[in-house]
Structure formats: C-alpha cells, structure tokens
Image (spheres, grey):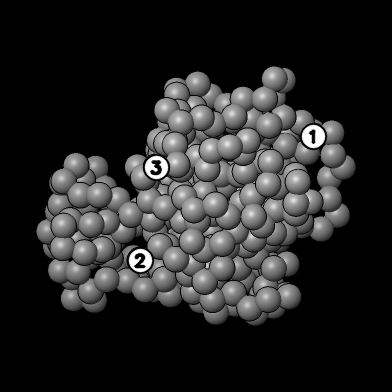
Amino acid sequence: MQFVRYSDGSGPVWGVKTDAGVHALAAGPAGEPSYQDLTNQHYLDRLERRVEDGALPVVDPDAVDLLAPVPKPGKIVCAGLNYHDHAEEQDEEVPDVPLLFSKASTTVTNPGSPIVHPGGDEQVDYEVELAAVIGRRATDVDEGEVDDFVAGYTVLNDVSGRDAQMSDGQFFRGKSYDTFAPMGPTLVAGEAFDPNAVDVELRVDGETKQSSNTEQFIFDIHELVSYISADMTLEPGDVITTGTPGGVGIFRDPPELLEPGDTCEAEIEGIGTLENPVVAE
C-alpha cells in the first residue's frame, strides 16, 4: 500500500494513493497512522478494505503537494558500498561488514523541491537509494524479525558533495548540506513489497545514469537493520538508507556531476519517481 504525506493547504496530512486518487486518512475512524501502525499487518488489511469500499474521501493528487514521508528523522543511518556493481565501478573489495555513515536530519526535502547546489568548487553528485523507515523501537533485532520493525520503504536521493567528502576524509559534511536528502514520493508498507528484489533507476534530464536491482545488495535490508540495531537503538521515524548502485557521476569518465538547471528523477519499482530540480544557492 502506498502512503503519502501531503499538504492540501491546511497542513500536513496522510493519505493512501491509488489509481483513484489520494484517500484522506484523517476522515477514517482511526484517524491518521503512526509509523508504528504501519508495522501492523492487521491495521493495513483493515485500511485496505476501507479504501477498496470507498469509505474515505478521495483527493485529486494534482491538487496537493507531496511531502517527505519523514520530515525530520531522529537519525539517518546510511550504508556505503552496498551494491556489487557500485563496488566494481570503484574497483573496491566487497566489504565484510556494512560500512556505515550518517546524514544530518536537516538534509531532508520534499518531492519536487529544489536540490540547492552550494556553489564554489563543490562537486554535487546523485545517488538513488532505497530507504527503510523504522516503525517500532528496535534493539538487537534478529534478521528474521526485521519486517516487524519496518514501517515501510521510500526513495531517498543521497545527494553528495564530493569535494567536502574527499577533502574531509569522511562523509558527514559532504552528505549533510541542506536539501541533500530528497525523500518520497510514497511510503510503501505491507508484506507484498519485497525490498530485496526491486528495480532502481536514476535519470538526469531524462538520461539514465543508474539502473540496477536491489538483488545487487551486498547486505540486504534484513542484514542491515539487524546489524545496525545490534549497536544502536532505532526509534520510530529513523531512516536507514541502503547504498546506491553503480553509475554515480564522480566515477564516470569524465565525471558527470549535477549543475543548476538539471532535474533528477530517482525511481524505485513499486514506490514511484522522486523528481527534484537542481538550483543555484
């Protein structure tokens, strides 16, 4: 089921997106969901029946503005070098354990909102990533139980400032410019979505730059969340990003980096296309 967080002019609200439009959840008897609600398959089944029965008012999707599913995560934990094809393009050895870093929560921006190029000599790059949103407090979770703790999945463009990243010798500043984590357009919840077998693609001005499948994961969703939760407690609304496939701009010959005027389209099968223009600071 595709959940959307959106604004209709009166404030952020939640809905379910179908071919018929956006079904407004505030009008239902249970009201709007929490991230924990989305971990409950019984809740999802009941809600799906209400949507199918036409029990909720439907909003025209063209009349609302989509918002990031998690406007300000408690933390964003990122996995680096987690696709076999991305390791190959860098001529890097496959890691034995997940390589983790973080982005500041203030990087998050909405579908359609601009990615702000900081200017100067900064080399701004794109990275399409599948992101898992945590729905329940998770500490030392077994791989087989991870699904019980995930609210859903969304698209995150892990925009990166390569100059800062390389000159600092670590990732945090280069990954944490404002607007460097566009997120959306939907949050997909429910057991029908298999996060470890979906197509992933990124286009710049319509030209495909990255095209892969999460079957290329070195560490799949269940391994990642289990590994991370063994060392830090994950809270509802925390976001786990799963790495990017091959084709990033910095490793192209010559490099193909983002400039003001470009448009990024990050697409993941079953979730949708996250589109953001690049603008000057």
Q: Position of residue 218 (x, y in %)?
A: 74, 48
Q: Which residue is mark 2?
A: 44
Counting from the top left corner in percent of width and height, residue 265 is at 45, 34
Residue picked out by circle 3: 114
Choose the circle earlier in sequence order: 2 or 3: 2
- Name the amino acid, label 3: Pro
Q: Please state the horizontal and vertical placement of residue 183, each as a whole percent of the image.
A: 45, 51
Q: Amino acid at mark 1?
A: Gln
Nearer to me, 99 or 193: 99
Q: Do the numbered discs 1 and 3 sit on residues whose CB atoms are within 8 Å?
A: no
Q: Which residue is mark 1?
A: 90
Disc nearest the viewer among 2 and 1: 1
**Residue 233 versus residue 107: which sits nearer the camera?**
107
Q: Is residue 205 left or right of residue 104?
A: left
Mark 2 and mark 1: Cα distance apart in space: 41 Å
Q: Quadrant of the N terminus?
A: bottom left
As measured in the structure, the alpha-carbon distance from the residue carrying label 2 to the one carrying label 3 is 33 Å
Q: Image point 50% across, 21% down: which residue?
A: 207
**SS for dot 3:** loop
Mark 1 residue element? helix
Q: At 58% across and 37% down in the image, what residue appears?
A: 120
Q: Dots 2 and 3: beta carbons under 8 Å?
A: no
Please report the residue visible at 72 percent of the width from the left and 29 percent of the height from the top.
251
Q: Is residue 276 visible?
A: yes
